[in-house]
Image: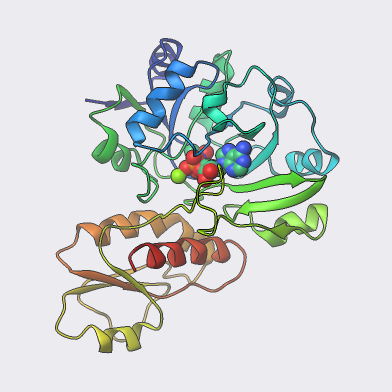
Amino acid sequence: MAIKGIDISLARQYLEADELVAVPTETVYGLAGNALHSSAVAKIFEAKERPSFDPLIIHVPDAQHLERYVTAIPKQAVQLINHFWPGPLTLVLRKKEIIPDLVTAGLDTVGVRCPDHPLTHQLLRQLDFPLAAPSANPFGYVSPTTAEHVEEQLGSKIPYILDGGPCKVGIESTIIGFENGKPMIYRRGGISNEAIERVIGPVESRLHSTSNPKAPGQLQSHYAPRKPFLLGDIDQLMATVKGKKFGVLRFKNAKNQAESEIVLSPSESVAEAAQNLFAALRQLDAMNIDLIIAEKVPDIGIGKAINDRLTRAAAASR
Ligand code: TXA
Ligand code: MG
């Protein structure tokens, strides 16, 4: 059973012995192992029950470390790093030999990010290897944003959870790659398209889709609660689910409150909604209800990334 705590040297000892440790980041908790040792990386896939064709991202303490693991850093990547690292931005770049194929599912690129959390930053600085870390949830489920979320689901599979409190961004990093030198957004996340475009100009998106689910790195992620999840206008949805026990996920306070209801942002901010999103989905999943009805949040800034998660959750339960 996992112990929770803030003992960085204990976390380090486990990681140096190729054991897994859950670590806090500003986005979500990660399930971390030595990215340079296939034996540790294999344990990550096993604990998450993640298919081995879905590649992992690696975490580094600062931009200087990047050069050890990737062959070339495009100019626009440098600009993005200067603006957003440490922070919720993952860059997909051509990998060096030192990164095992298991990490990248055989791709010749690797996703790298520098997380913005004091505990994990200290830990990374003490290690002489990067940490491979997917979100610390069973494959397909909602990402964890507290140490307790990790404990509930993976507690029996790992020795230690570094407890850094609730994650301040609350949704995963934005992922950007480069295709023929052109930047491409693969996943919406903690840094909005608008913020990225202010730094490097217009960027196209090729978001994970179901059209080609077997292509590594392009697998549809579900972010899904276990209960049926309906997305739309809450009043209309309420009318259609009469007689059933339902829970409601709202963006902001409303006059006619439902019995089982969670409001993502009483202050009507998309950043606050992002912080609360995954914990709210977990709470609704644990309530004595048959299904969840939800509305989108304003489609601005990080709101786009939230709506992306909500849409996928609804699609997954169809
Ligand atoms: O915020 C985050 O990014 C969190 C924290 C723990 O850092 N990590 C995270 O990891 O969300 P994960 O594994 O749950 O999601 C990473 C995504 C996956 O959808 C994977 O397919 C994609 O990144 N990915 C990884 N390497 C890739 C590559 N070389 N090319 C394209 N996509 C890649
Ligand atoms: Mg994930």
Q: Is 178 or 189 nearer to us in this picture?
A: 178
Q: Is 102 or 146 nearer to us in this picture?
A: 102
Q: Is residue 207 left or right of residue 290?
A: right
User: How far across and down, in percent of the image, does residue 205 sit?
Assistant: 68, 59
Query: From the image, which quarter does the C terminus lie in?
Result: bottom left
Q: Residue at x 40, y 47 (%)?
A: 143
Q: Is residue 43 above or below residue 166?
A: above
Query: From the image, which quarter does the N terminus lie in?
Result: top left
Q: Is residue 101 left or right of residue 85?
A: left
- Residue 21 visible: no
- Residue 295 visible: yes
Quarter occupied by residue 302 = bottom right
Q: Is 59 or 205 nearer to us in this picture?
A: 205
Q: Is residue 107 above or below residue 311?
A: above
Q: Find the residue positioned furthest to the right.
A: 75
Q: Is residue 9 left or right of residue 81?
A: left
Q: Residue at x 44, y 40 (%)?
A: 135
For the image, the number of numbered tags is: 0
User: How far across and down, in percent of the image, does residue 73 sit?
Assistant: 79, 33
Q: Is residue 257 left or right of residue 132?
A: left
User: How far across and down, in percent of the image, does residue 67 sit?
Assistant: 74, 23
User: How far across and down, in percent of the image, does residue 298 sit?
Assistant: 54, 74
Quarter occupied by residue 138 = top left
Q: Is residue 196 above or below residue 264?
A: above
Q: Residue at x 50, y 58 (%)?
A: 210
Q: Is residue 259 above or below residue 271?
A: below
Q: Residue at x 24, y 40 (%)?
A: 152
